Image (spheres, rainbow, N blue to C red):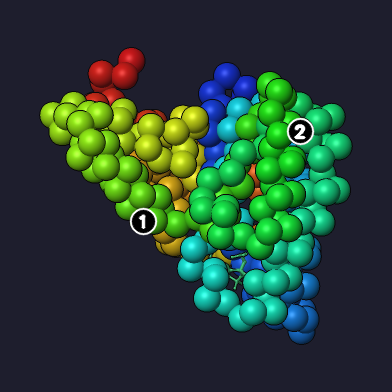
Amino acid sequence: MNKIEDIDNHNLPSHLAIIMDGNGRWAKQKGRLRVFGHENGVKTVRSTVENCVKIGIEYLTLYTFSTENWNRPKYEVETLMRLLVSSLKKELATFNKNNIRLNTIGNIAALPEKAHNELLDVMEKTRENTGMTLTLALSYGSREEITSAVKAIAIKVKNNIISPEIIDETIINTHLYTHNLPDVDLLIRTSGEHRISNFLLWQIAYAELYFIDVFWPDFEEHHLVEAIKNYQNRERRFGKTSEQLT
Ligand code: IPE
Ligand code: IPE
Ligand code: MG
């Protein structure tokens, strides 16, 4: 089985993003409630974060709760928010021990006050850490992100702060939630679904996509290592020819 030590650390994805999917089906398969899947999904978050630190990933972004997930049953949404608060409380010490800086993307003001405050607190308490940046996408939707960027830029144009001619990709980037993150290099989605579900549409323009038919609570170190090794065997051409790269 693949181990972290097997990874060539010269060609690592700088920014790894993960769509952590399949908690509900994992629980259903076991005859349990969906929230049992989420509880076990938290354990996978913990091990994956630690493994990414060991591997030397600089930016890890986890799709934790989408704008569309608000439409789930009230009990499930409440459980997810409760798990978020309890995990943050528990993990603060580990973040500091591992030099992890916590960051968020999404409309976090839409979260329940307790979750919002806990996030702000942990972000503040890990602000000076210089190791991996762990970004949680919470109440995040890529279309919502792009819409608010367009709105903010339009207001600046209207108020003569910028002229429309200078709007370029860099200006758009600086108005996204991800303004402080590089583009995604590798995007993993668990659970066997082959879709993006409104995640980082702009930022994955040239990401390598990796889909794995394993539910999130069953995603282990060797799956992560396999995904990274697979990434390392790909040729990222960015529109050029293969010959131009050598
Ligand atoms: C991912 O697992 C967790 C969240 C979206 C919050 P799901 O809850 O989507 O599980 P499935 O896809 O229904 O199995
Ligand atoms: C995407 O998973 C959102 C998260 C993992 C947080 P979903 O389970 O919500 O996606 P769809 O609805 O199956 O596309
Ligand atoms: Mg799902």
Vertical comparison of 174 with 9: above or below:
below
Judging depth in this view, the residue of 26 and 202 nearest the camera is 202
C-alpha separation, residue under disc 1 versus residue under disc 2: 30 Å
Vertical comparison of 95 with 245: above or below:
below
* Mark 1 or 2, nearer chain start: 2
Checking the image for residue 37, the label placed there is none
Q: Nearer the viewer, mark 1 or mark 2?
A: 2
Residue type beneath disc 1:
Arg
**Residue depicted at 28% across the width and 46% down the height:** 150
Judging depth in this view, the residue of 184 and 125 nearest the camera is 125
> What residue is pinned by disc 2?
125
**Residue depicted at 61% across the width and 81% down the height:** 73
Judging depth in this view, the residue of 118 and 158 nearest the camera is 158
**Residue depicted at 49% across the width and 30% down the height:** 180
Q: Secondary structure at mark 1?
A: helix
Vertical comparison of 31 with 23: above or below:
below
Residue 61's x, y, as percent? 57, 43
In this view, the residue farthest toward the left is 165
Please say if the residues under marks 1 and 2 sit with CB atoms less than 8 Å apart.
Answer: no
Residue 197 visible, this angle = yes
Residue 199's x, y, as percent? 45, 53
**Residue depicted at 66% across the width and 53% down the height:** 116
In this view, the residue farthest toward the bottom is 31
Crowd around label 1: few <14 · some 14–19 · many ≥20 (10 Å): some
90 left or right of 14?
right
Residue 49 visible, this angle = no
Figure quadrant, ligand 1: bottom right
> What residue is pinned by disc 1?
143
Judging depth in this view, the residue of 236 and 53 nearest the camera is 53
In this view, the residue farthest toward the top is 246
